[in-house]
Amino acid sequence: MTSLFSRCSTVIALAAITGCAMQAPMVRNDTLPEAVRVPAGHVQALYSVGAGELTYECREKKDMTGAFEWAFVGPVATLSSTSGDILGRYYAGPTWEARDGSKVTGKQVAVSPAAPGSIPLQLVKANPSSGEGAMANVSYIQRLNTQGGVAPSLPCGTDQKGQRQQVVYKADYVFYKTAM
């Protein structure tokens, strides 16, 4: 079992690598909806605040000729520390990239509802990372404390087909690594 001191030391070491001077908040997984809890054996390594836009496109629904919806295209966000220092960016893939050039992509494994008008909380299983640095060996990523980002409520039909809309959002992204 990893001690709180070891986990905090990991967060502080990663903060130093990414240029963040303040210690990030520690997430208590036992207080989160079960679907988005990180499995046992993983420890928090980095905490970031993502702020940006989600792009949606008016498209015909799959297998439903004549029915349209605002379909998610991709994100563009800046990842910052809680004190506002830029740590990296988040973009389509999904890809999280630290300022040091290290990157991680992943696949959604679970979601849980958030406040009305906000995109859901999310748990992502990370793929093997690229580059050495803050994103090296990330195993899971959580999206928490979401604000905004839901699909537009604008009309979406034949006349709007192909149109894109950007929606402002904010969320916390918490990165985990396998406990040692």
Image (tube, rainbow, N blue to C red):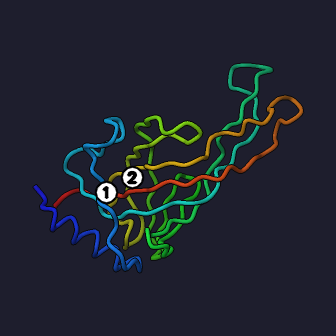
Instruction: Name the one closer to the observer, 60 or 14.
Output: 14
Distance from the alpha carbon under mark 2 to that under mark 1: 6 Å
- Judge the density around disc 2: few (<14), some (14-19), many (≥20) Cα neighbours within 10 Å: many
Q: Residue furthest left?
A: 1
Q: Which residue is the site of mark 2?
A: 141
Instruction: Name the one closer to the observer, 161 or 5.
Output: 5
Q: Which mark is residue 176?
A: 1
Q: Residue at x 68, y 25 (%)?
A: 62
Instruction: Name the one closer to the observer, 139 or 113.
Output: 113
In the depicted structure, whether residue 5 falls above or below residue 162: below
x, y (%) of residue 98?
46, 70
Of label 2 and label 1, which has the lower sequence position? 2
Disc 1 marks a residue whose amino acid type is: Tyr
x, y (%) of residue 65?
77, 19
Q: Quadrant of residue 68?
A: top right
x, y (%) of residue 69?
72, 30
Q: Residue at x 85, y 36 (%)?
A: 160
In this rendering, would 85 be left or right of 59? left
At mark 2, the secondary structure is strand
Disc 2 marks a residue whose amino acid type is: Ile
Do the residues bearing badges 2 and 1 touch, measured as CB atoms within 8 Å?
A: yes
- Judge the density around disc 1: few (<14), some (14-19), many (≥20) Cα neighbours within 10 Å: many
Quadrant where the N terminus lies?
Answer: bottom left
In this rendering, would 101 be left or right of 155? left
